[in-house]
Image: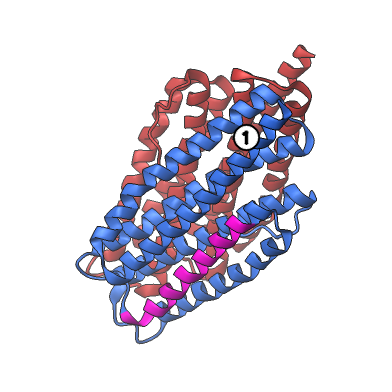
Chain colours: A red, B blue
Amino acid sequence: MRDNYREELDDIRGCLVDMANSVGSQLSKATTALLDADVTLADLVIAADDQLDATRESIEQRCFTLLARQAPVATELRTVITAMRIASDFERMGDLAEHVAKVARMRFPDSAVPQEVRPVFLEAGHVAESLVTKAGTVIAKQDVEAALELEEDDDAMDRLHRQLFREVLSEDWPHGVETAIDITLLGRYYERFADHAVSVARRVVYLVTGEHRINAAG
Amino acid sequence: MRDNYREELDDIRGCLVDMANSVGSQLSKATTALLDADVTLADLVIAADDQLDATRESIEQRCFTLLARQAPVATELRTVITAMRIASDFERMGDLAEHVAKVARMRFPDSAVPQEVRPVFLEAGHVAESLVTKAGTVIAKQDVEAALELEEDDDAMDRLHRQLFREVLSEDWPHGVETAIDITLLGRYYERFADHAVSVARRVVYLVTGEHRINAAG
């Protein structure tokens, strides 16, 4: 039974890594949909979110079954609870990617993102993908050092977020209030996406070390 | 041991109800700080958030201990996991109240909220408080019907949120982009606060009925 338990836990860990990849792919597509005003791609992102919700539910169910059948204690118990939480973080990150896609869809055939701030969103997309890729690696390898690296990426996201506000608030912002609102919400979605990736890494660190070594974000 | 288990679970439930009240009080104060540009009150809200984080951590620790010592199954297991999740929802609602207070603080001695949209935020504050009060009642009494009522309050919040956008996007909005950004973020904070209250109610319904009877929000 112990061996089955380990196998099941490894398998759940594998599902979480897959989920990290899917979430990264969702945000990458959403960013492209946003920058290229590609409504077909936006619709793909929106449609694919259900799959992430289903994966989260399946992981949760398997964790429940593990808890009920194996009654783990100490680190093993923490591992199962952490897996459930990470699945929730990834589901939420999927929602945020969907929100980005919905803004792209809402403004089609126009682009929600004016030329001046395109580089910022392109970069925010890259940083967010890097964060979620690293979060996947942290889960796969329980790598505490890699988890601490995520903090730096998150700082980069914070800088991009501030840069966005500077652009929108500059004296010569010519795009009016509606676009400013879009940019504000989009900036918030990317920032929250990054926060959740950091949160995933923080959960793994706590699991491995028993210490909160990354500060709370968001 | 079974009796102790029940007592401990009842006690945790009581802590969650207290947490609902604290979170409601935090948002109420944050709304007043926002509308009255009351920086002292804003600082109180910001300072008190640590207490909510500590309460969440304490509830989580107690749930962990219950899981490890009692190895509950079926509904009892679900109850403990649900308690942990509800504590997380409340902690996040506390963060959102703090975000509102921080906007009030940032614009002091000015008010972040111009006259035209004051009634909307006043109403959003009332709806949010009503939501969290009902969420507390749902937890205390495991009242499925009350949980379903929360959906209506959440609809009211969505209407207020749309009204806010209409105001900001009206042709004669005289307050510029910075205020529009504040209003957009504030609207988002109230909306997410409401979403989490609905999420709490949904978790209790699922626990009591085994069915997802309230649709996912947010």
Q: Residue at x 72, y 22 (%)?
A: A71
Please tell me whether residue B143 is drawn above or below residue B6 in the rendered image: below
Give x and y (percent) for residue A154: 39, 39
Name the subunit of mark 1: B
Give x and y (percent) for residue A106: 55, 69
Please tell me whether residue B88 is drawn above or below residue B172 in the rendered image: above
Q: Is residue B100 left or right of residue A72?
A: left
Depth check, front residue: A184 or B128: B128
- Label 1 Cα crowd, 10 Å radius (few <14 / some 14-19 / many 20+): some
The amino acid type of the residue labelled 1 equals: Glu
* Main secondary structure found in the magenta portion: helix
Q: Residue at x 73, y 59 (%)?
A: B144
Image: magenta residue range: B115-137
Query: Is B120 contained in the magenta span?
Result: yes
Give x and y (percent) for residue B108: 22, 64
Q: Quadrant of the N terminus of chain B?
A: top right
Give x and y (percent) for residue B200: 61, 53
Please tell me whether residue B59 is drawn above or below residue A177 in the rendered image: above
Please tell me whether residue B205 is drawn above or below residue A208 in the rendered image: below
Q: Residue at x 55, y 58 (%)?
A: A99
Q: Residue furthest left?
A: B109
Secondary-structure class at tag 1 = helix
Depth check, front residue: A22 or A116: A22
Q: Quadrant of the C terminus of chain B?
A: bottom right
Depth check, front residue: B113 or A170: B113
Q: Is residue B16 left or right of residue B36?
A: right
Residue position marked by numbered label 1 in the rendering: B8
